[in-house]
Amino acid sequence: MSPWRRRLKILTHIAGGLALLALMGGLLADALYPPFMGRLRDHSTLVLASDDSVLRAFATADGAWRFPAQADEIDPKFLRYLKTFEDGRFGWHPGVDPLAVLRAGYQALVAGEVVSGASTLTMQTARLLEPRPRGVQAKAIEALRALQLTWRLGGEGVLKIYLTLAPYGGNLEGIRAASLGYFGKEPRHLTEAEAALLVVLPQSPERLRPDRFPQAAKRARDKVLARLLAEGDIDAQSYKAAVAEAVPSRRLPALSDAPHLAERLRQEMPREAVIHTTIDHDLQRNLQRLLVRRSVGLEAGATIAGLVVGNKDRRVLAYLGSANYFDRRQFGPIDMVSAIRSPGSALKPFIYGMAFDELVVHPETIMVDQPMRFGEWAPENFDHLFRGEISAREALQLSLNLPAVTLMDAIGAPPFAQKLADAGFPLHLPKEAGRPGLPIALGGVGVSLEEMVSLYAGFSEQGTVRALRYIRDQPAAAAKALIGPLGSYYVTRILEDTPPPASWLASANRRQASRIAYKTGTSYGYRDAWAIGYTRDYTIGIWVGRPDGSFSGGRMGRDAAAPLLFEAFDQLPPSDSALPQVPPEGALLVGNTSLPANLKRYDIGPALSSAERPLNRLRIAFPLDGSTVPLPESETPVPLVLKAEGGNLPLRWLVNGKPVTSPPYLRQAQWDPDGKGAQRVTVIDAGGKSVSAEVWLK
């Protein structure tokens, strides 16, 4: 081998060895001095809606709104503009752009001062991760870190860090926080002007803050747009439209949708930085506005809570713990969805459902609403009146107390409570109560709005209940039977026929209206007003009251909560009846006369009868004798409801001597007036007793 070849071979080995040593040194340095990722990991806890929009964000320990971001979540035009304006060769260089370094050095040599920098997006990212005082040494460290970041993460990883940490003024960090803070939207779709503003703000975030220095922000933005026009990234028409667009003049309030749920989930999942919920963001906002608007008419200290659930998998679509979370004087932070309150009459459908399942009664069974004594306890109806004989259907629709207590006595309060507990919904008994007693039929027990909605949603699945689902990817909870298909079917038929609130037309008379089965409840002292309703697809619960549990002024579920329930259903797509298409096996869809003998009449027995029997006087409750009844102006005739109290069923109705067709085992009928003026309404009971009312229609 010639001396020349020998020297070349030696030099080659030396060069290879030096390169290997340099590589090993670089790997060792990379292992010993990894980039500090603390600021990247310390980002805001985000609670997201089902579409990944932000419901609520919690600031970091240092008070920053720092939202994690991914390149595929950002408008592509912003990424294109960013690279054009900040680093045209991003993705081609290893983190340090040698051409930019040579250009900056040459310009500085010719001009005698620094004319342009050579900082790349990767070097800026290194500075965001580890801020240092500006200087030559800091630049050198940033360059080495930039090489290291590119080596470790690649271009996409570097871009993710920049999009998360870039400063945008005040405590806004990252493009998502900036876009939401200045434009009120996620950065998936930005205008040319918005994208250009977000490109330039990190260069001098405090000096260019649009909420404080809008003119400076506009000049900087327009400079970016001019550069984009020169580079061919936008056309002349887009440029003119963009420079004419105003910059935002204020920063929007912090995100605070579903605040009670966000706070709850954050406490339950403290290690989760991003929590994906099942909440429908549009529905949540619509219901928040509705409840805030309706809460204005309440007395001081009162508020409203609401919960909306999709029945199919029990996902929670809207969660409103109170009307105003941030009003500390009105107990706003208290979450009334999970608070334990008295349900009033809202548990009665489950008493009837179990009684129907056990064939204690049928919806058309005649029951007795009269004074009774259960040991030392003599309950009364809410209005202190008694209706005498009445069908189980009417008793549930009118929410009468005595029939409900007699059924609870028949099925047993302890077994009733145990069935609820076995299904995953134990009742919260008063501390002094040793075991469940009959008063739980009238609200003498604790339950939350969350639990009530969970239970009512079971009627849409033939009596099968499940726990609610708040997390998007969480599987549906196991189903547990509470009410059988037969009892669930009967209850739903009854609750669907319950007349709507006074201000609402029945669903049959409304276009595209949901077929709502619902029940109201009012606790002792008017402390709690409830309305829970369900259709095939949705269940909604509304609670109105005072979080401190103090007395309210005559507020009842039907007047205060039921109209809100129907308004809430109007925010949802129309939904059909929760009844199955085919009645369950054993369903008897007949009147009282066709029932088996043991179901025609419910015998309370002499032990429960009061010593003081009511007179059971038959009377017409509406229209009252001597009253004037205005008829609404309408192109189609509007029926007039006739109501009776007392007497023995069945009842027969006549108007001006002519029979009115009506179900014989109900205490009301519908009559279509054939004109205005004097009318004579008569009702006759099974014993031949009759009473009449003279009324004037105008």
Image (tube, grey):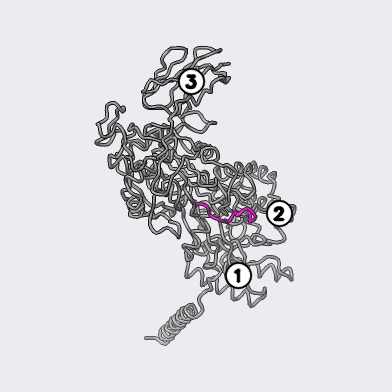
Quarter of the rendering containing residue 110? bottom right
In the image, 356 versus 37, the foreground residue is 356
- Of circles 1 and 3, the one toward us is 3
User: How far across and down, in percent of the image, does residue 268 sit?
Assistant: 47, 62
Give the vertical position of 19 relative to 324 (above or below). below
* Label 1 to label 2: alpha-carbon separation: 26 Å
| Dot 2 alpha-carbon crowd within 10 angstroms: few under 14, some 14 to 19, many 20 or more | some
* Label 1 to label 3: alpha-carbon separation: 77 Å
User: How far across and down, in percent of the image, does residue 643 sit?
Assistant: 47, 25
Residue 323 showing in the rendered view: yes
Q: Main secondary structure of the magenta part?
A: loop
Which amino acid type is shown beneath numbered disc 3?
Pro
Q: Quadrant of the N terminus?
A: bottom left
SS at badge 1: helix
Q: Which mark is residue 342?
A: none
User: How far across and down, in percent of the image, does residue 573 sit?
Assistant: 46, 36
SS at badge 2: loop
User: How far across and down, in percent of the image, does residue 368 sit?
Assistant: 38, 35
**Which residue corresponds to mark 1?**
127
Q: Which mark is residue 639?
A: 3
